[in-house]
Every structure is written in C-alpha cells, then in structure tokens.
Image: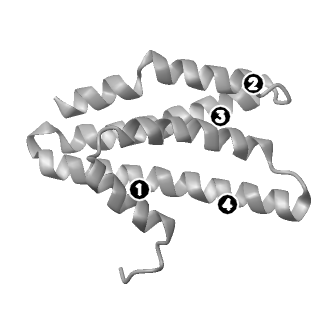
Amino acid sequence: MLVQQLHDALHSAEIEESWKSCLEAYKESTPQERLDLAEWASSVRATFLAHAEDVGDDEEEELRTSLALGYIEMKSKWQMLNTQINYQVFRKGEANVNLTYKSALLSVLVDKIGKFITAKDLQKIQEFLINPTSTAL
C-alpha cells in the first residue's frame, strides 16, 4: 500500500506539471539539454521507486527506513548542488544554469517524499543535514 502511494505521489500530475513548468522556463537551454534534465530527474525517481518496490510493503519498518534514507540521499544531493551553485556565483559571478535547474527538479521530489516521513523523523533528519559533522556518526 505504501509503495503504491509513493508511486502515485511521485508520478502525480503536480510533479509532472512542476517539472514541465521548470524546464519550460529554461529558455537559454537547447531542447536536448531540457530532455537530458528531464531524463535525469525521471531516473532519480525511478531508482528511488525501484528500491521501494524491491523492499515492498511486507517489510514496512524497513521500507520506512529506506524511505528516510532515500530522502536523506536526495536532500543531501540537493544541498550539495545548492552549495556548488552558491560558490560558483561567489567565485565566478555566475552559476552553471544546468545545476540550478537540476536542483529545482530535485527539490520537487524531496518535497513530495518528505510528506511520507513523520514530522519527528523529518526534524531529526533536518537537524543532521544542517550540520552533519557536529555529532559523532
């Protein structure tokens, strides 16, 4: 049941429309660049969902752990992209626009997956991700 809910949420019209709108705004790109970004985002989603399907609903505790780990992975990637973008702007005066759009597409998935994680667990994850080196691992 949870696997199907994840699948439905991550293939929702809301996500598809958000991605489409984001890519349409990328006017300075070529059609191939937009296609590559769309394929990248779809691949991230497919990899996450394939993992969830492999774990399956029968192992709900493990599935919820995997859900949290997938969220952490994507949120970490999103944070790394934003850090890179910010340093590009700081050092060069401009960012790689492709990275900016990659970050935007990924944020849509992160937001949607976060809705499947309890507020308490999300808070713990956020605290860790804000400063991952502040506590012993």
Q: What is the number of the mark on residue 37?
A: 3
Could you tell me the amino acid type at mark 3?
Leu
Marks 1 and 2, the one that precedes in the sequence:
2
Marks 4 and 2, the one that precedes in the sequence:
2
Could you tell me the amino acid type at mark 4?
Thr
Q: What element carries label 2?
A: loop
Q: What is the number of the mark on residue 25?
A: 2
Depth check: 94 or 120 in front?
120
Count how many numbered circles sit on residues in the image.
4
Marks 4 and 1, the one that precedes in the sequence:
1
Q: How far apart are marks 4 and 1 (CA)?
A: 16 Å
Does 115 appear above or below 85? Answer: above
Density class for disc 3 (Cα within 10 Å; few <14, some 14-19, many ≥20) is some
Q: In which quarter of the image is the C terminus?
A: bottom left
Residue 128 percent across, percent down from the top left? 41, 67
Density class for disc 2 (Cα within 10 Å; few <14, some 14-19, many ≥20) is few
**Going 66% across and 27% down the picture, which residue do you hit?**
22
Marks 3 and 4, the one that precedes in the sequence:
3
Q: Is mark 1 on a helix, strand or loop?
A: helix
Q: Nearer the viewer, mark 3 or mark 1?
A: 1
Marks 3 and 1, the one that precedes in the sequence:
3
Residue 50 percent across, percent down from the top left? 33, 38
Q: How far apart are marks 3 and 1 (CA)?
A: 21 Å
Q: What is the number of the mark on residue 72?
A: 1
Q: Distance between the residues labelled 2 and 3?
A: 13 Å
